[in-house]
Amino acid sequence: MKPPAFEYLAPASLDEAVAALAGQDAKILAGGQSLVPMLNFRLLAPPLLVDITRIPGLDYIEDWDGGLRIGALTRHYTLETSPLVKARFPVLHAAMAHVAHLAIRNRGTIGGSLCHGDPAAELPGLALLLDAHLKTTKRTIPVAEFYQGALATALGEDEILTEIMLPALPTGTGWGFEEFARRAGDFALTAVGVTVGAEARIVVIGAHETPMRLPAAEALFTDRADIAAVAEAARDEVTPNSDLHASADYRRHLVEVLTRRALTAAWERAA
Amino acid sequence: MRYLEAGKRHSVQFTLNGRAVEGEAEPRLLLSDFLRQHLGAFGTHVGCEHGSCGACTVRVDGKAVRSCLSYAVQMEGRAVDTVEGLASAEGLNALQAALQKHHGLQCGFCTPGILMSLSQLHEEEPAADEARIRDVLSGHICRCTGYHGIVQAALEVFGKS
Ligand SMILES: Cc1cc2nc3c(=O)[nH]c(=O)nc-3n(C[C@H](O)[C@H](O)[C@H](O)COP(=O)(O)OP(=O)(O)OC[C@H]3O[C@@H](n4cnc5c(N)ncnc54)[C@H](O)[C@@H]3O)c2cc1C
Ligand code: FES
Ligand code: FES
């Protein structure tokens, strides 16, 4: 199918981009790997596309006090193959292998995935797991306040995500990421990411409208926790919907199994 | 700042397989349609037009990209490579020849896209193992071969068979 007609603007700076978006019924175009399919399906018909990929200086992965600052235009492939990402956030490195396919990863950007906010996408869940701060042209938003529903974020119409800040993980943090999808590269039916250190963080993807932490299950996970019991608590904590891909019961079952596997792996990796 | 009006055609220039090309495209024209309908480069195939099948994969500045998920006007100043650029006067390149030898294609609809993804992989990750090769092939739907021959061909070229 062919996209509807739109005006095209390729600003050369963030200032130009923000000015172009102000008061316009416009869509930001980054990698286009979610937006262009939606236009091809005619699910959207924005009169104006603002292509931000010609703005220099938004594609980088840099040290941030042992953590990382990642430019919003950094491509999935760059994240997947970055030695810095692999060394500091191996859980993110592991999750990237589940995001789409080579040609999509070459083009899709971390900023685009976070702003698109697909409930079954890996990166929004990883951002929540890793307690990301999202820097925009206006402010810095903690990821816990960023997602408001499926495909809905706290961003204003003329606000551009510019940087993803990931604070350093304490040394010795264990991690696990487990996903179930029907075919390689598909969006997750359900995925679970965990980190285990002084505290445990458990994030579920694909079970709700937004990625979600499971505080009750997290609280159960103490030093000698019974991982199977934590996984059962995780299952009881989610309230997924049934849809044509999977029933709610099946998703709950997946949450239990994937949480058990992810915690087991994390426990083994923790120092 | 580059501004292009909706519904009007605008000049686009880029290199296609190393040769400068120029054409006119409305902003909404997909790269896949520009290649086929404006430049007559029919080697790039179009299946789903939403990024799933992989048939339309080309390379932009060396990276495999779905041409159905890019607009022609975005290619201004870029280097686009398609399957037409792989063979030389001496004949098929190594990947193409290996696909032929291992029966890695039947109807050939998926083949141009697969070649473009495998070409990037071969250049950037020459040490890729079978798992990585299969991971890359998972982005391409082939309805004919069952993939076995494609994997065998890739393994041979990557020195893993
Ligand atoms: C076949 C296929 C399979 C896929 N499988 C997966 C998968 O398994 N997992 C997964 O996570 N994703 C998957 N994706 C989606 C892919 O990861 C996209 O790249 C990503 O969701 C969007 O990033 P993008 O840069 O392409 O954004 P775009 O498509 O350009 O934009 C997406 C949205 O974000 C907005 N936006 C983009 N950048 C910014 C910014 N900096 N500030 C504010 N708003 C912005 C846009 O306006 C738009 O609304 C798949 C895509 C395809 C086509
Ligand atoms: S036609 Fe582009 S991926 Fe199917
Ligand atoms: S050879 Fe026919 S689809 Fe692959």
Image (tube, coloured by chain):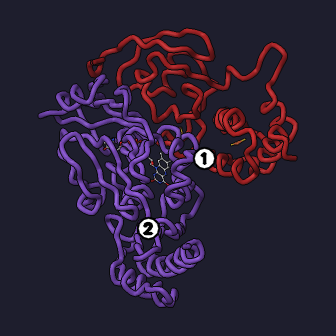
Image point 25% across, 43% down: which residue? A136
Residue B64: image location, x then y, percent: 58, 34
Residue A218: image location, x then y, percent: 39, 80
State the red chain.
B
Residue B139 shows which numbered tag? 1
Residue A75: image location, x then y, percent: 47, 40
Check the picture and name the quadrant holding the C terminus of chain A: bottom right
Residue A20 shown left or right of residue B56 in the figure = left
Q: Amino acid at mark 1?
A: Gly
Q: Which residue is mark 2?
A: A244
Residue A257 shown left or right of residue B110 in the figure = left
Where residue A38 sits, quadrant-wise, is: top left
User: Chain A appears in which tint?
Assistant: purple
Which class describes the residues within 10 Å of circle 2: few (<14), some (14-19), or many (20+)? few
Q: Which chain contains the residue that carries disc 2?
A: A
Q: Amino acid at mark 2?
A: Leu
